[in-house]
Amino acid sequence: IQADALEEIRQSNDLKELQDIKVKYLGKKGSLTGVLKGMGKLSKEERPVVGEIANKVREAITQEFDQKSDALEQVALNEQLEKEALDVTLPGRPVQVGGPHLLTKIVEEIEDLFIGMGFEVREGPEVETDYYNFEALNLPKGHPARDMQDTFYITNELLLRTHTSPVQARTMRQYDGDQSVKMICPGKVYRRDTDDATHSHQFTQIEGLYVDKNVRMSDLKGILDKFAKSMFGHDRKIRLRPSFFPFTEPSVEMDISCKVCNGEGCSVCKKTGWIEILGAGMVHPRVLEMAGYDSEQYTGFAFGMGPERIAMLKYGIDDIRNFYTNDKRFLSQYHHAK
Ligand code: PHE
């Protein structure tokens, strides 16, 4: 029995088959079990001898079985490991990580700067009334300066705001005419322009307004100078040129110097060395009055700038449409820009 069993176990190559062999010899109806069962019929003298032999045979078979079973399990495990192995040397699939839009970053940078100077951040509606977009800003119906901003009208009285200046009037109204106002307002604005490299029917503006007793033009200049230097570098200068807006008097346009120097020397971005950045001025007394402020007691300044334009100058972007066409090759360049 032992010789047969050991031989069968050695030949076996399969765990299931191995189990069957064990049952065949050691199971309830197995041949060795049969021998043990038949022991009762043996004589007193034979019993211990046969018993001892039978036990040895069982031990031998069990040992051989355990060894073979371990070996087969190991083989099975190795096969499984090989099948499920990962090739860690294969190149990975890169995970595409998004980032804030360049325009979002610029707006947030400008917000942070003005928050640091005590301005609060406000918002206003993009669908605006004719009153706030124009009339409250000293642009009555039929005023020729309305043509400066080609307008998308929705009805006679409703339109898509052409600038963020209506938020000046809305904010002052909320302050009841006896408090200082210091706010900026970023937001989308709309104009009936044909889109090209420098025009877009929808773009972004950031409005600024500071109204208090004794606000002067020099306050405006100081804040704009700080803004220009922190956005473009401390070597930049600003200059204010006279201009016209119906809601400011006097009105100015601000240029920054655009001399760019590197290791090879200095170049100038425009022949004049100056480039226009934003419009500003002292809030027109009539605008203060319409919003409920006493223009004898209160004065203020306002400015409006286009973050796209600022980003274009800062990063040398030559087409405003890049901001809106969502080409990842363009946008991803600026995820880590400062
Ligand atoms: N609203 C003006 C524009 O869109 C900019 C501006 C704002 C000018 C505030 C003066 C004061 O052109």
Image: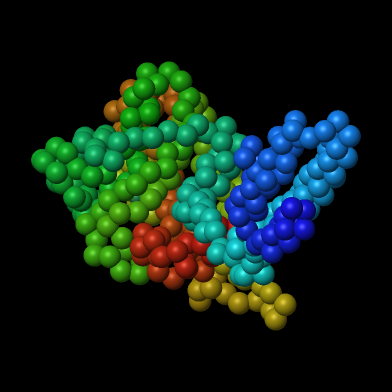
Looking at the rendered structure, the number of numbered marks drawn on it comes to 0
| 314 to 300, vertically: above or below | below
| 314 to 177, vertically: above or below | below
In-image side of 55 versus 131 (left or right):
right
Q: Residue pushed farthest bottom?
A: 264
Q: Position of residue 30 (x, y in %)?
A: 65, 43
Q: Residue pushed farthest left?
A: 156
In-image side of 70 versus 112 (left or right):
right
| 72 to 158, vertically: above or below | below
Between 115 and 99, the one lying in front of the other is 99
Instruction: Report the residue at 53% width, 33% height from top.
Output: 119
Q: Where is residue 16 in the image (x, y as percent from the top left)?
A: 60, 52
Instruction: Report the residue at 24% width, 39% height from top.
Output: 127
For the C terminus, the image quarter is: bottom right
| 291 to 139, vertically: above or below | above
In-image side of 190 versus 67 (left or right):
left
In-image side of 29 versus 291 (left or right):
right
